[in-house]
Image (spheres, rainbow, N blue to C red):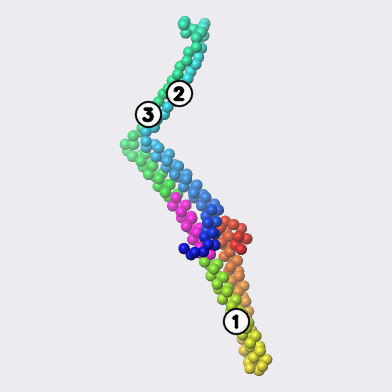
Amino acid sequence: AYGDPQLDALMDEALAGSPTLAVAAARTRKALAAAAVTNADRYPRVDASVSTTRERFSANGLVPPPYAGAWQTDNEFAIALSWDVDLWGEHRAAYASAVGDARAAEVDAQAARLALTTAIGQAYAELQHAFAKRDVAARTLRDREAILALTRDRQAAGLDSKVELKQAESALPATREEIIGYDERIALDRNALAALAGAGPDRGL
């Protein structure tokens, strides 16, 4: 919306590298998987099994001929259909709860994304504001330095007194301190953006 590619890149970088978002996304996937498992209990279930047993009867045992001393193979195939009819709505309620948990986890993930991008947007705007105010202070300093030079010339020519010269000189230190303050603010805002992007302090440069 701001049309600022640098801000867009910072937000993309933060969203890609945020461990908080990774945790939120993992919670969402887990909740969706749990909902799928719960939903499976609402439908019929089919189980099938196959087994083969091969054995040799002893020739000297209790088994009479012709089975004595022969091999016997038993093959078994079984299929079972089961359906837990949800007369009281237990499975339906469990599924609704699981879907609610999944949606809540998804909302948490979206909320985390929104909180992160909002914080980046605010820090970025504060950084721009600090730069703008520093530019104004720098121009003010240049103007006051020019006024001081002019006042010195006028005082040397006898057009101004030492009072005007002292006034012109006294305006400079406050403006220089103001610029130092904005430089500190810019450094802090850069560090804040680097931290939000999940990078080291050098990223703020």
Mark 1 sits on what residue? 143
User: Where residue 116 appears, x then y in whole percent?
Assistant: 50, 58
User: Where residue 150 appears, x then y in whole percent?
Assistant: 63, 87
Residue 147, can we see it? yes
Q: Which residue is rendered at x = 60% and y = 76% of the image?
A: 138
Judge whether residue 120 is colored magenta.
Answer: yes
Identify the mark at residue 50; answer none if there is no mark.
2
User: Where residue 161 appears, x then y in whole percent?
Assistant: 64, 92
Range drawn in magenta:
106-124
- The reply to whether dot 3 and dot 2 touch (C-beta < 8 Å) is no
CA distance for labels 3 and 1: 91 Å
Of the residues under marks 3 and 2, which one precedes in the sequence? 2
What crowding class fits label 3: few (fewer than 14 Cα within 10 Å), some (14-19), or many (20 or more)? few
Q: Which residue is rendered at x = 58% and y = 73% of the image?
A: 134
What crowding class fits label 2: few (fewer than 14 Cα within 10 Å), some (14-19), or many (20 or more)? few
CA distance for labels 3 and 2: 15 Å
Q: How many marks?
A: 3
Q: Amino acid at mark 1?
A: Asp
User: Where residue 166 appears, x then y in whole percent?
Assistant: 64, 87
Mark 3 sits on what residue? 81
- Main SS, magenta region, reads helix
Q: Which residue is rendered at x = 47% and y = 8% of the image?
A: 67
